[in-house]
Amino acid sequence: MLKTNLKIAWRSLLKHKAYSLINIIGLSVGLTACLIVATVVIDELSYDKQWAKADNIYRILSAYKEVKGEELMPAAFSGLGPSLKKDLPEVQNYCRMDVVKNRLRFDESKDAVSFNMLRAEATVWNILDFKIVQGNPRRFVKGYTNLIITKKTQQQYFKGKDVIGTIVTTLPDFGEPQKYLITGVVDNLPQNTHLRADVMALSEYRAIDNKVPITGESYTFQSQYVLLKPGTDVKAFTQKVNNWYKQQLNGRKVDYLFTFQPIKDVYLKSDFAAVQDVHGSMRNVYIFAGVAALLLLIACINFINLTISRIFNRAKETGVRKVLGAGNSQLIIRFLSESVLFFAISFSLAIILYPFLLKPVETYLDHKLVVNLYSSVFLLVTIIGVLLISIATGLYPAWYLSRPKPAVILRDKIASDVGLNFLKKALVVGQFAISVTIIIITLVVHNQLNFMSHKDLGFDKNNLVNIDFSDWGKSGQSFKTELMRMPGVAGASITNWYPSSGSGNMSRTVKVGNEKLTLHFIQADADLPGVLKLKVNSGRIFNPNVSTDAIDQDTLMGGGATAKTKALIQNQPMLVTAYTAKLLNLKVNQSNVKFEGTTVGIVKDFYSESLHNKIKPTVLQALSNPRYGAMLIRVIPGTERAVLTGLNRLYKQYYPDNKPFEYNWVNELVDKQYKAEAKLQQLFTCFSLLIVFLACLGLFGLVSFTAEQRVKEIGIRKVLGANVSDIVALISKDYLWLVMIAFIIATPVAWYFMDKWLQNYAYRTHIQWWLFGIAGAAAVLISFFTISLQSVKAALANPVKSLRSE
């Protein structure tokens, strides 16, 4: 029975080639896009779920209680993890670990190579599970930082060699080179983890780093993870930890609160882009899942609409089958077989296209997709899903065709069904409402990205070169002096901050009324304001020729040890932004009450962070001869190539044994902050094109069947004097008003969702009315062009041929 139904369905498919081709193209495109997007979604949801103890691993988050609205930090006191394990029975183990960029030199005759390094301690073996390939890295070798490399790294740099016991050199940004000992090789770390790395470096901690600071000792913050006993109530445990910390302070004021984030949530539910390079967004997952569903929905709507349109052509076939004894269930199975066949062919084509599109998607995402269609479970679920969708999609047309009595069908009474015509029109409206919504969303995302890229940031980001944080040593000032003599260099500054590196290099809380405010400090040499081209509202900027404008870094960090140094710090010249001056009521040439220093100038507000965040109250301090930091270099337009060549040569002359010369253009660094929005715009552009294509493909099919059904009417109208434009208008008006209804429905929907999306930005564009106008006009024009392709053909047909049978 099934074989017979499939054979009949195949013959029908070959007989109606145009109808079949439109359906197969639409379903293939929809299914392929859906599979690709579903792969991305499933891979995003798989992060950090592969660890054997993932259900009980948590990251410690801290919040500074003293400052209202202070965000959570993905770090805590270095000694918090060890102290919790010691005092609380719920904690089975802990590990301080994070991923950093580091350069390793495997061969003294070769340049150092940059790696993503997982810095951790020996307890990592009790938290995460790694497959050991070579050596015994679980046994920590004292006296060295133990380096564990992946199989990929071994094959790339030590092919055919026994690496265990090899000493390699690390070249940090600051400080002296260190020796690492390779103690083992592990299998490649998974790509679907926020701890994505190529090598691991395990080190020991000092005893002072293993306790919680209580009486004002110096301390460091580090990213930490704890392994809790199975069945631990995390909410109750969090309360217990904060109560425990309060007891540790012995009556002192509680300054931090702690919470615990499941490792499974770290990738998708962390807003810590500044300290966590590998992170996703749950919002994007919802967007991708929604788009995948919409693509498949439009492809299915096309299939339903085209099948319904052919009901009138197949009505007599159905009537004859009923007269010959076919029951409703047999007819339903017969038409469902045709639906399943269409989906099977389309799914097969999608499977063929899938691997060719997967690689470009991985390149676009910049990482390999670990979970894909070739996973046996994923493939099985996909096949079952496609089968169910094919049955669900074909069920209504099959049921509708099998329902009427033979006499009704054979008399063509089925053609007068108002409900069926309403369904067709509703499906067309639904398709184009989705299409217009996606077009509006794409335009709003583009508008917001354009707004952020061109907003005045308060400094000149163009023609500005940045050399990342380095140890300039005692040669920094002479290097800078020599650099300033180079043709094409307009200015240079050694700074502890550069655009896109955060809000500043240090912060401090001050009391304003009944609340506390965090001030963000930028420390650099006196040339920074000039190099950035900051605009002065009142007062002056730092003068590099005035020695008292800058303070020695050691003096500043040492505090007021003597009366002289205390006076220097108290009277140190400061620059503040207009926003800071307003908040703290600061005046030029007045000593600051809230913090040490004298305000010598108020500069126009500038955005130290991306426009995702509100502007921060910022203070600039000038340092004399800073030894550590980045270097910003202002280049005269037109001399870029010559300056970079000379800069590279000068850098190697002064720092031959330092890290390789690397630079970035500041405008690129600033734009990189909006990489997520740029990718979102590209995705929506792609999706909108696909969705519009599918909608137009379905519309083309509907117009084709409409022209076929009205061929005699068109012939009569032509005989009576109608011209081509009259015929085109006759066919077009039935569909264009549906597109207008779709636009009316899509407008408030798109506005609602995009207004919500824009709330994520501290500085955002307004949703302009003309964006909706462009989307509506585009939908109408594209629809009219699609309709015209077939309606013009029908209008140009010879009426003699269409009326011959009359």
Image: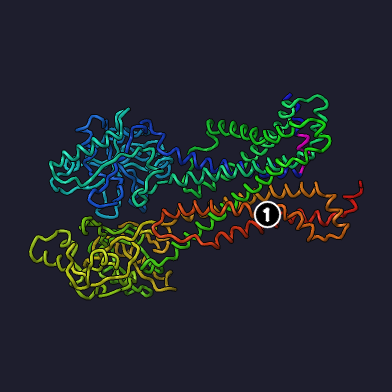
Left or right: residue 356 versus residue 519 is right
Magenta-highlighted residues? 10-17
Image position, residue 797 (x, y; %): 84, 54
Image position, residue 76 (x, y; %): 25, 44
Residue at the spot 42% in from the left edge and 46% down from the top edge: 280
Binning the other alpha carbons within 10 Å of mark 1 as few (below 14), some (14 to 19) or many (20 upward) gives: few
Coloring scheme used: rainbow
Residue at the spot 38% in from the left edge and 30% down from the top edge: 52
Placement of 372 over or under 105, stated as above or below: above
Decide if residue 379 is in sight here. Answer: yes
Residue 781 among magenta residues:
no
Q: Main secondary structure of the magenta part?
A: helix
In the image, farthest residue toward the left: 563
Left or right: residue 205 versus residue 31 is left
Image position, residue 416 (x, y; %): 77, 41
Placement of 500 over or under 643, stated as above or below: above
Using the rendered view, name the quadrant where residue 136 is placed. top left
- Relative to the observer, which residue lies in front, 798 or 805? 805
Q: Quadrant of the N terminus?
A: top right
Identify the amino acid type marked 1.
Answer: Trp
Q: How many marks?
A: 1
Image position, residue 277 (x, y; %): 38, 49
Residue 15 among magenta residues:
yes
Left or right: residue 686 versus residue 12 is left
Can you identify the residue that label 1 sits on? Answer: 737
Q: Secondary structure at mark 1?
A: helix
